[in-house]
Amino acid sequence: SFFVVMMAISTLFLSSCSDDDDNNDDPAPEMKGSMFIKFDHVWGPAQAPFALNTELVHPASGDTLEFTKLRYYVSNIVLHNANGSDWVEEESYHLVEAGTQAGIEFELPIDNVPAGNYTGISYMIGVDSLRNVSGAQEGALDPAEEMFWSWNTGYIFIKAEGQSNVAPNGTFTYHLGGFQGAEKAIQENYHDFQGGVLEIMPDANPSVHLTANAARFWHGGISTAQTPMVHMPGPMAVTLATNFGGGFAFDHIHN
């Protein structure tokens, strides 16, 4: 019986030691959570609702425009932590479709974000140069998405198509891309949350709400009367992509 008691004590001692060792060797797994980026597509400085297959009057030119398609890549998403660190999403390539989800907003789910307080976001509109020359790809970058030209000219970053009352043939088609040199049409946006904090934690789904102003394509006096079609990289593709990218703004956070 003395032997049994001593065995029990030694077993307890060994198990407590091994527990301590486990705690030292394997710190608690990093806490993670999910979030949404919500794109609220709007029209003009008054931020009127944007919708496909709906007549929209441009606030500057007075042209009547009706979109049948508006889709674009959002990639290379980075969240900026209040502690000064950055979280970079891996394989960060997403296609946003304006006007196709219920309501006006398009929801982009972002998963496996380390828990913490975030005060800003960065992202690209377009596809970075490396992935433009990386061959056949999957997911949002699959050529089946019809956002890819050829191995030479790479991805279409933004597709905007529709009708116009002043275009020579009644339509506009903007397929905007270009990833190098003077033809680089990639837009890099950063939004500070203006004192707001995005709180990432397990079992919560906070969201960052951004507005995207589709009227900005024709910023600076551009009209479908003179520019009804852009189908290849070049100065006008850069101008239109820059205009559109400049039409994104931070609106609010929901925690």
Image: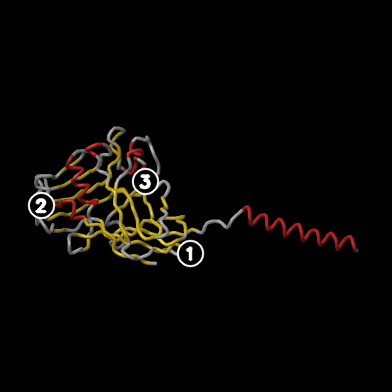
Residue type pointed to by label 2: Asn
Q: Earlier in the sequence, mark 1 or mark 3?
A: 3
Q: Nearer the viewer, mark 1 or mark 2?
A: 1
Q: Is residue 54 left or right of residue 116?
A: left
Q: Provide the secondary structure element on which disc 1 rests.
A: loop
Q: Residue at x 9, y 55 (%)?
A: 61
List the residue tagged with mark 1.
203
Q: Nearer the viewer, residue 137 or 134?
A: 134
Q: Which residue is mark 3?
A: 140
Q: How far is mark 1 from mark 2, CA to CA?
A: 49 Å
Q: For mark 2, give the secondary structure.
A: loop
- Please tell me how many numbered marks the rendered image carries: 3
Specify the quadrant of the image occupied by residue 181: top left
Specify which label sits upstream in the sequence, 1 or 2. Answer: 2
Q: Position of residue 225 (x, y in %)?
A: 9, 47
Q: Height in image: 16 above or below 228?
A: below
Binning the other alpha carbons within 10 Å of mark 1 as few (below 14), some (14 to 19) or many (20 upward) gives few
Residue at the far top in the pictured view? 152
What residue does disc 2 label? Answer: 165
Helix, strand or loop under label 3: helix
Residue 166 shown left or right of residue 202 in the figure: left
**For the residue marked with disc 1, what is the amino acid?**
Asp
Local crowd size for mark 3, using a 10 Å CA cut-off: few (<14), some (14–19), many (≥20): some
Colour scheme in the image? secondary structure
Q: Position of residue 186 (x, y in %)?
A: 27, 44
Q: Depth check: 45 or 30 in front?
A: 30
* Residue 232 spot, x, y in % from top left: 21, 38
Say which of marks 2 and 3 sits in front: 3
- Note whether 244 is above or below 156 in the view shown: below
Q: Quadrant of the N terminus?
A: bottom right
Question: Residue flagged by tag 3: what amino acid is it?
Answer: Ala
Residue 9: x %, y % from top left:
81, 62
